[in-house]
Image (tube, rainbow, N blue to C red):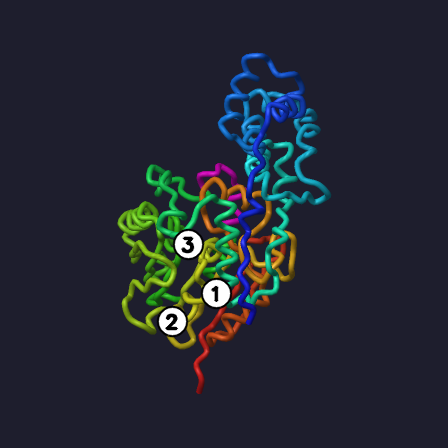
Amino acid sequence: MTTSKTNLSAAFEPRSSTPDDVVYAYRQFLGREPDEAGFADWVREVEGGMSVDVLTGHIIASQEFHSRADEDKLNALAVIGEGSPRKFSFDQIDTVTAALNVEPFRGSVQVGAFEIPKEFDLWLDPRSGDYRDQQLSLWSGITGRSNYDPSVDEDTPEIAEADSLYRPAFYSTGSTFVAGDHLMALGHLLRQSGLKTGGRALEYGAGFGQIALAFARTGVRVDTVDINPAFSAAVNRLGEHYGAPLSAHVGEFGFNPANEDGVYDLIYFYESFHHCFNFLEVIPKLHKMLKPGGKIMMAGEPISDSAVPWLPYPWGVRLDGENVSIMRQRGWMELGFREDFLVSVFETEGFKFQKYPLDGYHYCTIYSFERVDAA
């Protein structure tokens, strides 16, 4: 097994800005020469150590830039990244994050990807501690954080004030198209689960608990686990409102709310497994929680059938512009997985794999892993 350590910090070192960079930013992104007062304000920021990346991000995020015509904005942003789809460097994360919020350019950011640093070791064993540490180093460089702690870095405090009954989760988008996609995935999970009244299920990362509620309303007893206390409170409100057999718990992936093995018919993840950084330790725990023949199911997950620019390794931090920007802003762990690697991990732990795709609907593709016990 490879044991070399890699240091990725150099790839994230920002270049300090100069007054010349201020002039360039005005000309390139605002289409004009800097005014005297504005220039003086930015020079003070530059002298305080502002990087080119942060400077550019602020200019792009300004109201003046957003008020420009779409064609002018597209022409100005053409200097960000290169190629098609675009490739970004890690010294321009704030620039790309700002550009993501410019509607005419948003698609270019979403399909573009950051290039892995030249110091990155692609030959590490994906099940090794060194591989895990390298991915943590990549996350740290993107987020500017260290010592990943799900209870802190995965927090979403704003949802405490959200409507958990009338328009939670995908309903709050106001889009019947978006809601329809998620409802189709919900239905596909219920249909493929095979559960009946009296069954028992566990959901990790339940959010507002819409899938858990659907299972519970069929008579399935459902436990949920979420790192966020506000989400768990929302699920408990659902249970009380509908008189449904729902029980929410605050905890990390792998926490067993039943406190005994061999209890669950189904453990499932919907748009949540990609936050499970310690999945290699969690999967054996899940195996113990299931009844013989029980299943783990996941849907809405970023799983690729080959190496792609946003996932050039078996598993790890997603490198597409949108998710790198989300990690920068929120601190979340946004992972992706290659299907062959993920399946091999589950098979090693005693599971049989089955895939249930629904062509054209990403959220609906279900990855099912059935516990298989030796005769």
In the rendered view, does 71 fall on the left or right side of 8?
right
* Any part of residue 51 in sight: yes
Asked whether the residues under the numbered discs 3 and 2 touch, taking CB atoms below 8 Å apart as contact, a structural biologist would say no
Q: Residue furthest right?
A: 83
Residue 266: % across, % down: 40, 66
Who comes first in sequence, dot 3 or dot 1?
1
Q: Residue furthest bottom?
A: 375
Circle 3 crowding by C-alpha within 10 Å: few under 14, some 14–19, many from 20: many
Magenta region, residue range: 171-182
**Quarter of the rendering containing residue 72:** top right
In the image, what residue type sits under mark 3?
Ile
From the image, which quarter does the N terminus lie in?
A: bottom right
Which residue occupies the foreground of this view, 259 or 220? 259
Residue 374: % across, % down: 44, 84
- Residue beneath label 3, please? 211
Element at label 2: strand
Q: Nearer the viewer, mark 3 or mark 2?
A: 2
Circle 2 crowding by C-alpha within 10 Å: few under 14, some 14–19, many from 20: many
Q: Answer whether residue 174 is magenta in the image.
A: yes
Who comes first in sequence, dot 3 or dot 2?
3
Which residue occupies the foreground of this view, 261 or 126? 126
From the image, which quarter does the C terminus lie in?
A: bottom left
In the image, what residue type sits under mark 2?
Leu
- Residue beneath label 1, please? 129
Magenta: main secondary structure equals helix
Query: Which disc is residue 290 wearing?
Result: 2
Q: Answer whether residue 341 is magenta in the image.
A: no
Who comes first in sequence, dot 2 or dot 1?
1
* Any part of residue 101 in sight: no
Identify the residue shown where x is 45% and y is 48%: 332
